[in-house]
Image (cartoon, rainbow, N blue to C red):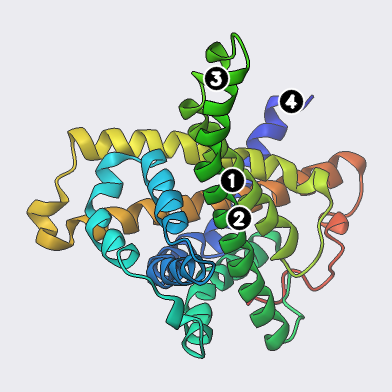
Amino acid sequence: MMDAPAIWRIIRNVYVRFTADDGLPLAGNIAFRTILSIFPFLIILTALAGFIGNLDLARDVVTFLMETGPDELVAPFVPEIQSILSEPRSDFLSLGILLTLWTASGGVDSIRIGLNRAYGLQEHRRWHVLLIQNALFVVAGLAMLLSLALLIVFGPIMVRFLEDWVPGVEAVTAYYHALRYPVAVLFLSLAVTAAHLFLPARWLPWRQILPGICFTVCVWLAVAVAYSVYLARIADFASTYAGLGGLIAGMIFLYLMAAVLLLGGELNRALRLERDRATGRPEGESLGDPDRDKGDGA
């Protein structure tokens, strides 16, 4: 159990290191590159769905994801997203997909740089290894979304089957639609966990990354609720940015999400430093990287 001075040291350490590591500028970079990659990512998703012969899979999963987000934030993007999903793109699975994969992996690369900064690690992997890793993250995300789409498509069929053949199951299946929120939280948790495990320049033990993962997911949910209320009751981006209001609102939201993600990494680092202090080890020895503060993590 930590005492009050230790907690304040951790909070101060997170703030000081987040500022020193250019956390806010890096969060802006992540937000920009994520916005830049969203539509190419959806194009690949649509192309893969068309390739396997069921374009409705892409529409179902995107509709599911939009339903779990704040209406005030999602609504401005709905027409553009629907225009992408309205036509099959099986012909896109060609050389053009490589360029799109590179664009979509830009957001992953920004997160990698930010987490390396947060953990104080110097990147040592070669550029082609990082490029492959970024592409694998994009492909894994696509596979996860398509799996979710299959669940959305076949879930109602299974529910109807159970209601027809299993007596008294209605009380259970009534909660089916409410499961979209726990499922969304689960997918967020898996994505954050994968980012902390595989993107930094060094493999980090579970116990060292778990606090930051829990912090990130919980604060993300709180920020999403607070930002939704803010957009609904206070903000009026349209009066300042006209037709770009929805885009600006989305950029700010992603900016906050990226900052929280990096703060999770800084929290993990501060906790490790505090454990080193408590055990009498030289500060930062458990990081295992003597050059951790020499590079910028890029």
Q: Which mark is residue 163?
A: 3
* Residue that carries the numbered disc 4 in the rendered image: 3
Above/below status of 198 relative to 275: below
Quadrant for the C terminus, please: bottom right
Q: Where is residue 146 in the image (x, y as percent from the top left)?
A: 56, 56
Measured Cα–Cα span from mark 4 to mark 3:
54 Å
Is the residue under label 1 in contact with that under label 3 (CB below 8 Å)? Answer: no
In front of the other: label 4 or label 3?
3
Lower sequence index among marks 1 and 2: 2
Q: What element carries label 3?
A: helix
Q: Is mark 1 on a helix, strand or loop?
A: helix
Above/below status of 212 relative to 285: above
Above/below status of 67 relative to 43: above
* Residue that carries the numbered disc 1 in the rendered image: 187
Q: Where is residue 112 in the image (x, y as percent from the top left)?
A: 62, 68
In front of the other: label 3 or label 2?
3
Q: Where is residue 173 in the image (x, y as percent from the top left)?
A: 54, 20
Amino acid type at circle 4 is Asp
In front of the other: label 1 or label 2?
2
Q: Residue 144 carries which label?
A: 2
Number of callouts in the render?
A: 4
In this view, the residue in front, 75 or 213, is 75
Mark 1 crowdedness (10 Å alpha carbons): few <14, some 14-19, many ≥20: some
Lower sequence index among marks 4 and 1: 4
